[in-house]
Amino acid sequence: MLVREKKGRTDSIYLLLDTVNPKRGGLTRNLLRRAKLLSESSQHDIHILTFDFNPNYKQIRACLEEKSLINECVYIHNLYEHLAIQSGFSQPLLPFQEPPIEEEGLQVDPVMQKNAYRLYRNGLYIKYKNYDEKNRLLWIDYFNENRYRTKRETYDYDGRLRRTTYMDYHKNKPKQIRYFDEGGCCYLTKWFNPENGQCTRVNFFYDDNRIDTFKDERDLKISWLDRLADAFPDAIFQTENTRLDKTDELILGMKNNQVAKVKVVHSNHLKNPSDVQGPLLEAHENAINNASSFDAMVFITQKQKEDVRKRFGPRTYYHAIPHSAPIPSNSSTIKRDPWRVVCIARFSRSKKLDHAIKAFRKVVTKFPQARLELWGFGPEEENLRKIIKRLRLEEHVFIKGFTHAALDVFRGAAFSVVCSNREGFGLVIAESMSVGTPVISYDINYGPREMISHEENGLLIPLGKIDKLAAAMIDLFSHQEKRERFGKEARKIVDTMSERTYVTRWLQLYDHIKNKKKHQIKVGPKDCSLTGVKLTNKKTLQVSGEIYLGDKGRINEDLSVSLYLHHPSQQLTQQVPIQMTWNEEGKERFTTEVQLSDLLNGQKTGQDSWIFFLRFSDNDFPVYTPLRAKSNSIQYKRFFLAQGSRILIRCDRQGNVILSIERFRRIVRGLKEKFKKRIRHHEATLKTRIQKWLQVPS
C-alpha cells in the first residue's frame, strides 16, 4: 500500500508521469515545482505515480530532496517498487555487491569512448558490460558462440540483479522478462511476441503461491490505478504525459469512474503548430477526442484553450492555468556577461537550435567577441556539433550540457534565445524573464506571445526567419540600454504570473471538480443520439433524437435541456429549447425546430457549419454533450434545398452531427470557376497538340 496521508491533511492528488529523473526537461521540472507548491499551500497530499522500470528510485528521491525539489508531503511511487513490496516475499536483502570488470579466465577489451568492456573466453565473445560515469554496473549482455545475444541482466546501484531479459536469437528482441526484488525473488514476468514486440502476458507472483495474470502491460498498469482509486475514492488522478499509449491511455482505461480525472495538455496539440483547424498531433488526438471522459482538461495558455474550444465546441471542462514564474534568489553573485547569449532546451528537432547556430554565424561577423551557449541534452547533440564544426564556430558556440541551475545560467547572460517551432508554454521564457534576462523568441503557438510584449520586454521573430533572428541578436548586442530596459520590464513577470495566483487557481480547480462530481448530471456522448432530421415548409429543420439515461434515472424537472448549435466563430452560435417525452425504457425522446432564417441572417460567408450539442443545465454545472448520429437511422450525408441554399447534414469521424449551409450563389460561382479552369486546361492541351502536330515552336 502507498504511504499513508499525514494526519490533518485531506484528499490526495495523484500525478501520473511515465518517469521522474533528476536530469529532467521542462515538463518534469514544472510538475515537481507544482507538486511542492501545492503540498506547501494546501491540505492535499501529492503523490507522483511513475510506470517505468528503474531500480534506483531510492537514489532518485534522495537527489530530489537534496536539491529541495520535493518535500516530505510529496511522495514518489513506482509501479515496480510497489509490486515488489506487494508480492510479500520476505527474503533478506542481498548485500551490496561491486561486480568486478575482470573475471578469472576471461580477456577484457575496453570499448572506445564508452565506459564498457567486451569479455572473451578462449577467443569467443561472451559478455558485454556497461557502466555509468561513477563506474556502477548497469547491465551485462550475454552472447552464444554465434554472437547472438541470449539475455541481458540489469543491476541496481547496489550491484543487485533486478531484471533479466531473455532475447530471441534472430530478432534480437525480448521473449521473456523476469523482475527481482532486493532479496533476489522473482515477483513479475512478462512474455513478448518478438515478431512485433508486443507484450502478450504478465504474471504477478505472491509469496503464498498465488498468481495474478494480466493480458499485457497496459492491463497491469490500469489494474494498479483502479486499486488505488478503490482505496481512495475521493482522490484526483491527473495525467501529465504527452507520449502515445502512456498515462492518457491509462486514465481513459480505468474502470473506476468515481474518482476525478484531469488531463493537462503541456504541448501544442497540432501537427502543424500554426494551423488551428489542421490535423491533431497523434499524441493528443485520443485525449482531445475523448475529452468528455475527463472531469477537467487543463491548457497552459488561454489562447490554446480558446482555439480548442472554437474548433470542438463548448466544454465546461476546458480550463487554462498558465505556469508561474519562479521567484529568483537575491543572494546570487553571478555577474551578467554583455557578450554571452544562452539557449536552454532539449536537443531535439522541434527546438530548432540549428537556427540559433546559423544566425550566430552572422552575429560573430560583427561582434567576434560574442558567445552562444547551448545548455541541455538530447538526440540532436551530435548533429549540432557537426553544424558548429561545419560553420567554423568552435570558438563562438559551445555545448554546455544539462544544468540544474537554469536561473543562474540565465542570470549571467545578456539575453536568451528560443527557437522552437512548437510549445505548450515555454517555461524557459518565464525563467529567463524572472531574472531580468530578455528573450528573443520565435512567435509561435503557444506561450511566447502570452509572456513577451514585442519591443517592450523582449523580441518576437517570425518563425523560421534566421536573418531576422540574427538581426535581433545584433540589435540587443549593440544597445545595452535597450537590454536593460527590456530586462527591467521582464522582471515584472514574477508579479503578473505569481506563484500565489498559480496555486490558488489549481486549488480552485480541484474544489470545482469535487463539487461538479457531486452535482453534475452524468451524460456523455454515447447517451445522446440523433434519430432524424426533416425539412418542413422550406423554412424549418425539425430535429429529433434520444437521450439514454439507463440507471441514472429520469431527467428531473429542474433540469433544462436545449439544442446548442456551435459555430467556430462563437458569434453565430444558436440555442434552441427542446421538448421532452418520457419513455419507460429509460430514454428521453426530444424534438425541436431550428429556424433556417436565424442561421441565414447571421451568415457572414457563403458557407458556414455548426456542430450539434445538447446543453444540460442543472445546479450551476452545465454540460455540453455532442449529439451523435444513431447508427443505421441517419445517412452519413443528407441534404435539402431551401431558401436559396443547400443544407447538408453530415457526420465527422467521431460521429458528431454537423449542419452546413451553402448559398446557391457561392455554389454557382464555384461551378463557374471550375468550368473556367477546365476550359483553360482544355485550351492549353489543344494548343500543345496543334503545335506538336504542326511542329511549330511554342
Image: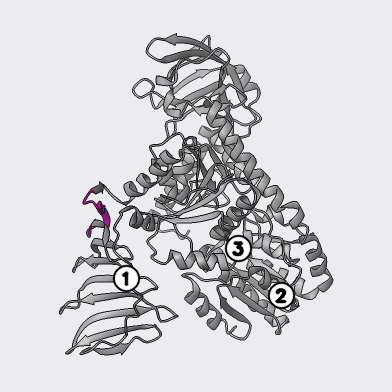
- Between 482 and 251, the residue placed more toward the observer is 251
- Few, some or many C-alpha atoms within 10 Å of disc 3 (few <14, some 14-19, many ≥20)? some
- Few, some or many C-alpha atoms within 10 Å of disc 1 (few <14, some 14-19, many ≥20)? some
Q: Earlier along the polypeptide chain: callout 1 or callout 3?
A: 1
Q: How far apart are marks 1 and 3 (CA)?
A: 56 Å
Label 2 sits on a secondary structure element that is: loop
Q: Which amino acid does label 1 sit on?
A: Leu
Q: Magenta residues, as a range?
A: 192-210
- Asked whether the beta carbons under mark 3 and mark 2 sit within 8 Å of each other, the answer is no
Mark 3 against mark 2, which lies toward the viewer?
Answer: 2
Q: Position of residue 382 (x, y in %)?
A: 47, 76
Residue 236 in the figure: left or right of residue 222:
right
Q: Which amino acid does label 3 sit on?
A: Gly
Q: Which amino acid does label 2 sit on?
A: Gly
Q: How many labels does the image show?
A: 3
Q: From this viewpoint, is residue 22 visible?
A: no
